[in-house]
Amino acid sequence: MTARRFVVNASPLILLARIDALDLLHQLAEEVAVPAAVLAEIRARPGQTTVISESVERGELQMTPDARSPEEVAGWDLGRGESQVLTFALANPLWEAVLDDLEARRCARSLNVPVTGTLGVILRSKQAGLIEAARPLVEELVREGAYLARDLIDTALAKVGE
């Protein structure tokens, strides 16, 4: 187990749950946090809550209270979930933000917050030997609605030998 810690937004949680790979988060990280605003966003979407709520109940995902976003986050005018993920990561420098939203990722980089996305979680899982192949999960992500450019997929998979 690594000392990695993730704070995760709604999109990665939903996508990983849809492809039955939510467990990769807690296999890769010592702790996985989900801000209350992210859970509220997920619960507002019909059909998205069961497996994620069960993970919270089992303690695999730790709900964290929302906090007031500092100006350097609030000024980006991101969604509430993204803002809370970044607020948490900024206040907890040992944590990495897991975000798919491009603007939120740009904000993270501008604040020197370590960031990865759903694709990164899958690639790291392959590198850690948690999955045999990344390509099938990546293809499932695309079928489930993740927008990933074909050249990005090809480049990413090449990095893990696929």
Image: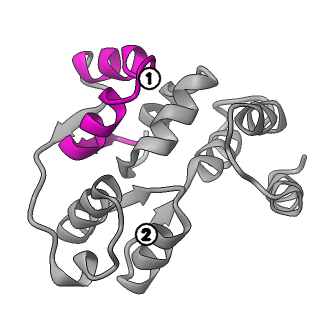
Q: Are marks 2 and 1 in contact (CB under 8 Å)?
A: no
Q: Residue at x 39, y 60 (%)?
A: 96
What x and y, as percent, mark residue 29? 41, 42
Q: Nearer the viewer, residue 25 or 10?
A: 10
Residue 68: in magenta span:
no
Query: Which of label 2 and label 1 is nearer to you?
Result: 1
Alpha carbons under labels 2 and 1: distance apart: 27 Å
Residue with the mark numbered 2: 114
Q: Residue at x 49, y 70 (%)?
A: 105
Residue with the mark numbered 1: 48
Q: Which element is circle 2 on?
A: loop
Q: Which element is circle 1 on?
A: loop
Q: Is residue 45 left or right of residue 158?
A: left
What x and y, as percent, mark residue 142? 76, 39
Tell me where the magenta segment starts and ends, as one range: 29-57
What x and y, as percent, mark residue 49? 37, 20
Among numbered discs 2 and 1, the one appearing first in the sequence = 1
Task: Tell me how the rendering is colored.
Answer: one colour
Q: Is residue 128 above or below residue 112?
A: above
What amino acid is at disc 2? Pro
What x and y, as percent, mark residue 146? 67, 44
Q: Is residue 114 above or below residue 96?
A: below
Q: Residues within 10 Å of mark 2 (few under 14, many from 20)?
A: some
